[in-house]
Image (cartoon, rainbow, N blue to C red):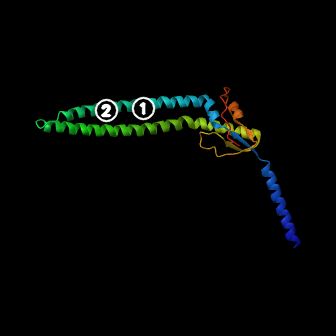
């Protein structure tokens, strides 16, 4: 019986020690949107993506204009259809219909390809930037002795943290580590 009591006290002591150790772990939070909004590389990458998107959209718009022109011509041709020219105009309308279907498919394919190209370019541009930010976050967290860092950015879909009290906001430290000197208006903090 005495051994059982000793085991109980040892187990309780271990649990108490473990709880004390976990209670001493420091937490921090960062607003990654603010970091990325002020990072020159991210701004440049976003500009490159916007330019690429505009180029792709211009190409698609040109195809849409061609489609609309051919459609209007086919509709005008259809109005000239009569019994006398039924055979020749019918063939022309059939050819125009096939051209319109082909052009419609090209437009759909161009939209899909543009989306894929932009996604690929986004990955190429932002992967090194994200790695750089992650490295800075890790370095600041280690410097401050933080066990966990939560991202409180609203646009990332990661604002799962609905309440915190205390913790270190390392956003400014990460921005400094990345060499960001410009400060933007600070977004509102999540409600506690």
What's the mark number on residue 159? none
* x 28%, y 34%: residue: 71
The N terminus lies in which quarter of the figure? bottom right
* x 41%, y 40%: residue: 112
Q: Whole-percent x and y of residue 140?
A: 72, 37
What's the mark number on residue 57? 1
Q: Whole-percent x and y of residue 17?
A: 82, 55
Most distant residue in the left direction: 84
16, 123: nearer the viewer: 16
Q: Whole-percent x and y of residue 20?
A: 82, 52
Most distant residue in the bottom direction: 1
Element marked by disc 1: helix
Element marked by disc 2: helix
* x 80%, y 55%: residue: 18
Mark 1 surroundings within 10 Å by alpha-carbon count, few (fewer than 14), some (14 through 19), many (20 or more)? some
Residue 10 higher or lower than 153, as above or below: below
42, 91: nearer the viewer: 91
* x 64%, y 33%: residue: 34
The C terminus lies in which quarter of the figure? top right
Of the residues tagged 2 and 1, which is closer to the observer?
Answer: 2
3D distance between C-alphas at marks 2 and 1: 16 Å
Residue behind mark 2: 68
Most distant residue in the right direction: 2
111, 86: nearer the viewer: 86
Q: Is residue 43 left or right of residue 12?
A: left
Q: Earlier in the sequence, mark 2 or mark 1?
A: 1
């Amino acid at each position: 019986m005495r051994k059982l009591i000793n085991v109980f006290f040892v187990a309780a002591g271990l649990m108490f020690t473990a709880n004390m150790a976990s209670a001493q772990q420091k937490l921090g939070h960062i607003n990654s949107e603010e970091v990325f909004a002020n990072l020159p590389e991210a701004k440049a990458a976003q500009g490159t993506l916007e330019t690429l998107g505009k180029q792709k959209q211009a190409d698609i718009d040109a195809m849409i204009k061609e489609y609309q022109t051919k459609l209007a011509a086919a509709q005008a041709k259809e109005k000239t259809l009569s019994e006398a020219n039924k055979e020749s105009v019918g063939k022309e309308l059939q050819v125009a219909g096939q051209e319109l279907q082909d052009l419609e498919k090209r437009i759909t394919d161009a939209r899909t390809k543009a989306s894929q190209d932009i996604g690929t370019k986004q990955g190429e541009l932002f992967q090194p930037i994200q790695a750089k930010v992650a490295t800075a976050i890790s370095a600041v967290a280690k410097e401050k002795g933080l066990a966990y860092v939560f991202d409180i950015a609203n646009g990332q879909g990661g604002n799962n943290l609905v309440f915190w009290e205390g913790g270190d906001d390392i956003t400014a430290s990460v921005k400094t580590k990345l060499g960001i000197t410009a400060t933007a208006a600070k977004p509102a903090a999540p409600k506690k």
